[in-house]
Amino acid sequence: MDLRPIKTEADYQDALQEIELLFDAAPGTAEADRLDVLSTLVDAYEKVHFPIELPDPIEAIHYYMEARGWSPQDLEPCLGSRAWVAEVLSRQRSLTLDMIRKLHQELGVPAEILIQPYGAFQTSA
């Protein structure tokens, strides 16, 4: 296979097959260099044709909480009172910029996930 941009599904499949053949190439060899270039081309093609959407901010918070063994009470330093934590997790209160910063810093949730618009049910205050 000639090295060229991947423009079609057939090009993509050909590149994947060659990557599989080159997967165990020894570092510093021409085969390893070819593997690196093909992998870069496949990555670029996949970003355009198979984009991965960011998760919903509240679902991401739940995921990160579960991964760290956190309870809703552990979010109080990031979100405020116990009531505010419950309201954010049930989508009755939207995240503020300060909450986003704290969740990013303390829980490790990427800010680009937290700043996305999401379905929150606003109550009149």
Image (tube, helix red, strand yellow):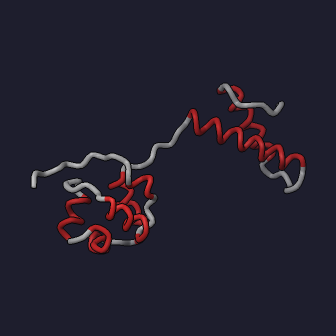
Image location (x, y in percent) of residue 98: 33, 64
Rendering coords of residue 88 (x, y %): 24, 59
From the viewer's perspective, tell me whether residue 110 is left or right of residue 85.
right
Look at 32% across and 55% down and name the residue there.
58
- Give the quadrant of the C terminus: bottom left
Q: Residue at x 76, y 42 (%)?
A: 19
Question: Quick check: 11 above or below 76?
Answer: above
Foreground pick, 7 / 116: 116
- Which quadrant of the view contains residue 46? top right
Q: Is residue 114 left or right of residue 43?
A: left
Q: Which residue lies furthest to the left in this view?
A: 125
Between 23 and 57, the residue placed more toward the observer is: 57
Report the residue that reaches farthest toward the front.
97
> Residue drawn 27% across and 73% down?
73
The vertical placement of 61 against 46, above or below, is below
Looking at the image, is 99 positioned above or below residue 38? Answer: below
Q: Quadrant of residue 66?
A: bottom left
Q: Is residue 103 left or right of residue 82?
A: right
Residue drawn at point x = 46 percent, y = 43 percent: 53
Pick the quarter of the image with the N terminus.
top right
- Of 41 and 25, which appears nearest the observer? 41
Number of residue marks: 0
